[in-house]
Image (cartoon, rainbow, N blue to C red):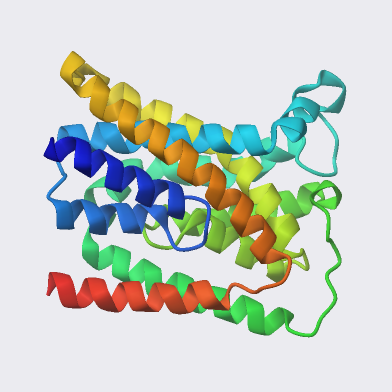
Amino acid sequence: MYEYFCALVVGIVEGLTEYVPVSSTGHMIIVGHMLGFEGTLADLFDVFIQLGAILSVLVVYRQKFTFILNTHHWFRRKGPSVFNLCVSMFPACLTGLLFHGFIKHHLFSPTTVIIGLVLGGVFMIVAEKTRKGKEFEVTNVDKISTKQAFLIGLFQCLSLWPGFSRSGSTIAGSLLLGISRKAGADFTFIMAVPLMFLACFYDLLKVIGSLSMGDLGILAVGFVTAFVVAYASILWFLKFLNTSTLTGFAIYRFFVAAFALVYFW
């Protein structure tokens, strides 16, 4: 029963943090250590609940994905087209492929997460300070250019460091590019779907052999929990960005980093 409890808790944490700029990976590592939920099953579980979070984005942006998948729109140079998504995904895919082993073996620890939480928070504050009082050149995701999509993809590479946060790095990066928080978030979430799916599929191939029938219930609990909570989290966050900045999330990250520092040392 304890494993089902862990599945519920970690599923909630994944759903709450995957798409807000606080680093889901960082929270998962910290919570996993606190619960003692580690090892092969935990690794497999982390992949499955991320798939649940991905499904929530597909539901929220179902109309956008229907438009994107229409072959007539594949090569549009504005907005989240297939072409622009491929361009934006390329930097992180290449970096992740080249350094996947190093990242998995050396960066997934409480220490590196604390560093990522702090640096990511500082980056978000700097981006907000830089854009303060300035008009946004792009306020709609459908106006994002191919060049801007590629640059957002470069900022996404920062999220390969656990604790930095995909949404934090890309939305803050979007601000520096003159893109509004909401438009940057929309592009970030849509861009994350194929990238996260590829990453999950790659990780799943390596650990699927250790899956047993007894694990299916635990995985199902985490998957459904992550989906439901992530869906609600995305809707709330998109409304939040219409009237608020990223600074509050940056401060929260500093508190989490301080808590982790005290807890682990």
Q: Residue at x 57, y 33 (%)?
A: 194
Position in image of residue 247 (x %, y %): 56, 78
Q: Is residue 176 above or below residue 35?
A: below
Q: Residue at x 47, y 37 (%)?
A: 227
Question: Seen in the image, is 114 located left or right of residue 261?
Answer: right
Q: Is residue 78 above or below residue 182?
A: above
Report whether residue 42 is seen: yes
Q: Please identify the quadrant where the N terminus is shown.
A: top left
Q: Residue at x 24, y 29 (%)?
A: 218
Q: Residue at x 15, y 44 (%)?
A: 38
Give the residue furthest to the top. 213
User: Which is nearer the eye, 111 or 147?
Assistant: 111
- Corner quadrant of residue 7: top left
Question: Seen in the image, is 109 located left or right of residue 156?
Answer: left
- Corner quadrant of residue 238: bottom right
User: Which is nearer the eye, 72 or 19?
Assistant: 19
Q: Please identify the quadrant where the C terminus is shown.
A: bottom left
Report whether residue 94 is seen: no
Position in image of residue 246 (x %, y %): 59, 72
Position in image of residue 176 (x %, y %): 70, 71
Position in image of residue 119 (x %, y %): 43, 74
